[in-house]
């Protein structure tokens, strides 16, 4: 196989613009997946992806197709193989949601080009812009594609005009496809051959392969997805250059519809290596695989910049006996998601657990649900927070990611919080609604740019505002048409307080939050109202209080469950009923003095949404 016949590319787009469906049609057109085995979103292999209809993990697949030598055209309609040569397409399907943008960056580093997909009915969205600039900064050729042209509401010509005006594409560069029907997919693959260059590695050089993804297999240990840059990767002893670990691979092959053990991955190709290693932290995304011994490469590949978590929360096992299972689960999950971080902590209320970092609230919810579904560990999760920088009176800088990490008020000189540059992309009909919505928040207006019927609005605002419910409100006031992108740019001073929640006059650490002083009363009211709705009633009356510095800001009460203790009585003197009722009241009072309120896991999930 000549390296000139290989094309490595990825599909990038805003969420729900049809990346996975287009990948399905490519698998069908190239004959990679048999029609009997084909299913929708074939590359979405995680159950949660299929349940939510979104891509969470990047997925690589190898496609092979015959191409005519004389005409240079793909022979995929009639299946001719005479006078043809084999072309290899290594496709990486990427997520579209902002919380998984790190997956896109890893995919771009393993490719020579990208397909920029835009929904013909929705047009350019926030992640369309963000992913375009990621690909441009990586110096990759970009193929603009208008998808879903068969929809009744499709506006392919208008969308193409937006692409030309926004990104400067020429009219002849833009392709039109339908990921549902397959229209235009063959022409798109032909454009990949013509516009994206072949890999530039040297087969005679020492082996260097970049690990761009990995997962854990109970039989094969850590399985690394690799892009071979130089040399060839076979069944020889290998070394991880950063970790210094030496291993002999159990299996080497390509990721087709299912793993295909070929024993060799050539220069410029994408495949997998079953390392056999059981220590998960030894194989990290971004490391370089080379040959062990005298043929070892001298310099490693650049790798990836470590993602910086922006949202933090504590995870505790629902059952304290499952701590070891939770530890194993987060270690294995971290192997597949480098943007997820964790460190052990101890809570006097909830016991041992882990302080975890996420890229956003969707990322947090996905991690929690995958831990339950894939590893069978039920978890309790505390309210999410951002990372604050605290300057103490003795001149030190401390990081506070949770209420428990905030020093006492007498030791705090200044607290700073992260601020973001937020870009909202919407139709001009919803600009007024968005302006009214932002007026109630801590935001600074930056700019508004009109791009035909679409408008890009820029604001600066605290990250804590973004992760709370800002995205949901943007979708609500724009009837679902607006999208947003954000980037942390700076830290600014903030007047921060610790908001505690008391249940039955006892503080519940897992529900504590760090909030801005001016918003403490509002957040406290919403918390206690929500808790009153979702907490199951107890045998005794449960007061719910939101407290800051000993001052009660909001209160609700859950009435006790009442049992008719007089039902068994019939007739007789009234004093018999009074005696039973008095005894019941005394028992409830005693339970209220001694009882503790257990918060079910479902309640924590509801509070996170608040």
Image: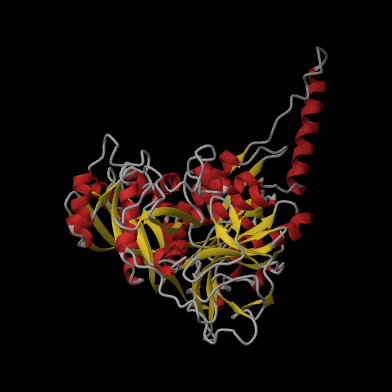
Is residue 80 depicted above or below 563 in this figure? below
User: Left or right of 155: which side holds 393?
Assistant: right
Q: Position of residue 182 (x, y in %)?
A: 36, 42
Q: Nearer the viewer, residue 558 or 147?
A: 147
Q: Quadrant of residue 485?
A: bottom left
Work out whether residue 402 or residue 497 is closer to the camera in this orientation and state it: 402
Q: Is residue 75 visible?
A: yes
Residue 322 position, x and y percent, is 75, 55
Q: Is residue 450 visible?
A: no
Give whichever of 324, 108 is nearer the camera. 108
Colouring style: secondary structure
**Residue in the image at 36% along x and 48% along y:** 17
Furthest residue in direction front, as rendered: 83
In the rendered structure, the answer to whether residue 180 lies left or right of residue 409 reads left
Quarter of the image where one finds residue 583:
top right
Residue plotted at (77% across, 19% down)? 567
Q: Position of residue 346 (x, y in %)?
A: 70, 66
Q: Quadrant of residue 224?
A: bottom right
């Amino acid at each position: 196989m000549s390296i000139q016949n290989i094309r490595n590319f990825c599909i990038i787009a805003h969420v729900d613009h049809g990346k996975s469906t287009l990948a399905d049609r490519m698998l069908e057109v190239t004959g990679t997946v048999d029609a009997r085995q084909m299913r929708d979103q074939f590359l979405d292999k995680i159950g949660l992806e299929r349940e939510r209809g979104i891509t969470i993990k990047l997925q690589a697949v190898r496609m092979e197709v015959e191409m005519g030598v004389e005409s240079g055209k793909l022979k995929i309609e009639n299946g001719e193989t005479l006078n043809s040569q084999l072309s290899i397409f290594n496709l990486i399907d990427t997520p579209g949601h902002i919380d998984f943008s790190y997956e896109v960056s890893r995919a771009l580093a393993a490719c020579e080009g990208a397909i920029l997909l835009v929904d013909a009915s929705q047009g350019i969205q926030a992640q369309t812009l963000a992913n375009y600039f990621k690909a441009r900064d990586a110096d990759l050729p970009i193929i603009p594609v208008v998808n879903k042209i068969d929809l009744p509401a499709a506006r392919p010509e208008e969308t193409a005009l937006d692409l030309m005006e926004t990104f400067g594409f020429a009219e002849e560069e833009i392709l039109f496809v339908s990921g549902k029907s397959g229209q235009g997919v063959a022409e798109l693959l032909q454009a990949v051959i013509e516009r994206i260059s072949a890999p530039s590695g040297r087969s005679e050089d020492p082996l260097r392969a970049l690990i761009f993804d990995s997962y854990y297999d109970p039989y094969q240990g850590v399985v690394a997805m690799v892009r071979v840059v130089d040399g060839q990767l076979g069944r020889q002893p290998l070394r991880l250059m950063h970790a210094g670990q030496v291993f002999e691979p159990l299996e080497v092959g390509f990721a087709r519809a299912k793993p295909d053990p070929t024993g060799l991955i050539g220069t410029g190709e994408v495949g997998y290596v079953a390392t056999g290693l059981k220590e998960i932290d030894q194989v990290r995304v971004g490391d370089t695989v080379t040959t062990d011994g005298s043929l070892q490469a001298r310099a490693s590949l650049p790798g990836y910049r470590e993602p910086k978590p922006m949202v933090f929360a504590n995870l505790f096992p629902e059952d304290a006996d499952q701590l070891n299972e939770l530890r194993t689960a987060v270690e294995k999950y971290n192997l597949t998601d480098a943007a997820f971080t964790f460190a052990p902590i101890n809570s006097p209320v909830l016991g041992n657990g882990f302080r975890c970092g996420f890229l956003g609230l969707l990322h947090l919810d996905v991690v929690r649900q995958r831990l339950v579904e894939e590893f069978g560990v039920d978890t309790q999760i505390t309210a999410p927070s951002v990372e604050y920088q605290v300057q103490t009176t003795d001149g030190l800088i401390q990081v506070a990611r949770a209420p428990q990490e905030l020093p006492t008020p007498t030791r705090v000189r200044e607290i700073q919080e992260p601020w973001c540059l937020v870009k909202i992309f919407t139709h001009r009909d919803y600009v007024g609604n968005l302006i009214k919505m932002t007026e109630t928040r801590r935001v600074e207006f930056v700019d508004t740019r009109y791009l035909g019927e679409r408008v890009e609005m820029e604001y600066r605002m605290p990250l804590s505002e973004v992760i709370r419910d800002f995205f949901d409100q943007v979708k609500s006031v724009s009837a679902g048409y607006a999208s947003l992108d954000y980037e942390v740019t700076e830290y600014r001073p903030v007047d921060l307080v610790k908001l505690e929640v008391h249940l039955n006059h006892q503080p519940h650490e897992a529900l504590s939050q760090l909030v801005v002083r001016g918003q403490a009363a509002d957040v406290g009211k919403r918390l206690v109202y929500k808790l009153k709705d979702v907490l199951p009633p107890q045998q005794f009356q449960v007061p719910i209080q939101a407290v800051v510095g000993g001052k009660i800001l909001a209160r609700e009460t859950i009435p006790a469950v009442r049992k008719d203790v007089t039902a068994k009585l019939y007739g007789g003197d009234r004093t018999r009923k009074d005696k039973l009722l008095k005894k019941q009241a005394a028992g409830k009072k005693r339970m209220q003095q001694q009882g503790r309120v257990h918060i079910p896991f479902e309640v924590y999930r509801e509070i996170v949404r608040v």
